[in-house]
Amino acid sequence: VDKPVQFIVFDNGKAGIMGEHSVMDGTPTVALCDAVLDIIADPEFDKDTNSIAFPEPPTLAEPLDWRVSPEIERAVVTAEKAALDLIESQAMNIVRTPYGKAAIKSFGCSPDAWAQMIVQLAYDRLLKALGQRRQGGTYEAATTRKFLKGRTEAIRVVSAESDAWVQSMDDANASVEDKKSLFQTAVKKHGSWARMSGNGLGIDRHLLGSYQYLHWIGSVSWNVSTGLKLVKKPDERLPEMYNDPVYQRSSNWVLSTSAVFSKHFRPYGWRS
């Protein structure tokens, strides 16, 4: 992982992309993939299989000799086990619906907002089946690339409006019209918050940045190799706001529902 983006192509034509997330987000990454796949799909694309002769590098690569101590070997084994445990704890499933975004749009609804509400309903029913209650929020990323050096902001999917619709879906006394009206209100609220986040009017990046700044600001030292370094003062305390139960509860994300869309990719989904 020495590059921001690497394409991995197999002999059978299957391909994937691996990115280093600190410099890459989903929206520009899928735009890059779409550009490449559009070129390949173009009938005019030259599919000549002749190999390409690359120029010789100006200098030959030099091997790096690593000194691996017993402590490092034990750390590698521990990290490998932790990674395998994490992988084995995950589950992936694909649910295909008989309708797509065209049908959703025909109802005057954003496909993303539609899907976000469905996720909220499914999660609520899962928790009820387990006898639990939601203990945090739902994170969805909004791109802020319209701003210089902009990356993302968080769309807070959970709202009073989304909760009201979710509860109505399992309420025997709620009519179809009531459920429809509550759904439309929830979708409208989601769209409003999504636009605000994309326009830089979200709260989470500001709060996170403020927290990091306040947490680490202190004496400043300069190192030639590492640059500027902020050292927290021993007697420094964070503002009480960051200890408030509401802030701490709102900072706990129980679902991550970011997704990217492409005409070339059929699966569409989330991690949670």
Image (cartoon, rainbow, N blue to C red):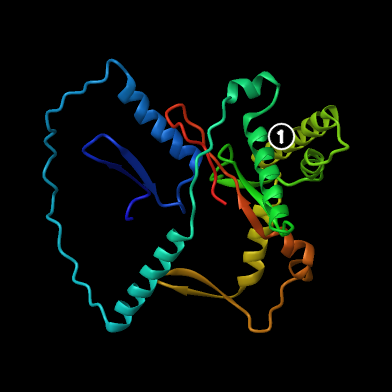
Q: Please tell me in which quadrant of the rendered image residue 187 appears.
A: top right
As drawn, 236 above or below 157: below
| Percent of width and height locating residue 189 | 77, 37
Q: Please tell me in which quadrant of the rendered image residue 185 appears.
A: top right
Q: Is residue 51 left or right of residue 203?
A: left
Q: Mark 1 sits on what residue?
A: 191
Q: Residues within 10 Å of mark 1 (few under 14, many from 20)?
A: some
Q: Is residue 44 left or right of residue 139?
A: left
User: Please, what is the three-letter code of the amino acid marked with disc 1?
Assistant: Gly
Q: Residue furthest top?
A: 43
Name the residue: 55% across, 39% down.
145
| Percent of width and height locating residue 191 | 71, 34
Which of 130 and 242 lies nearest the eye of the viewer?
130
As drawn, 77 above or below 83: below
| Percent of width and height locating residue 208 | 65, 59
User: Taking the image as drawn, is residue 225 in sight?
Assistant: no
Name the residue: 33% across, 24% down.
39
User: Taking the image as drawn, is residue 27 in sight?
Assistant: yes
Name the residue: 33% across, 73% down.
76
| Percent of width and height locating residue 115 | 63, 36
Which of 176 and 145 lies nearest the eye of the viewer?
176
Name the residue: 65% across, 56% down.
253
**Circle 1 — which element?**
helix
Mark count: 1
As drawn, 11 above or below 203: above
- Quadrant, the N terminus: bottom left
Which of 114 and 218 lies nearest the eye of the viewer?
114
As drawn, 198 above or below 214: above
Which of 47 and 104 lies nearest the eye of the viewer?
104
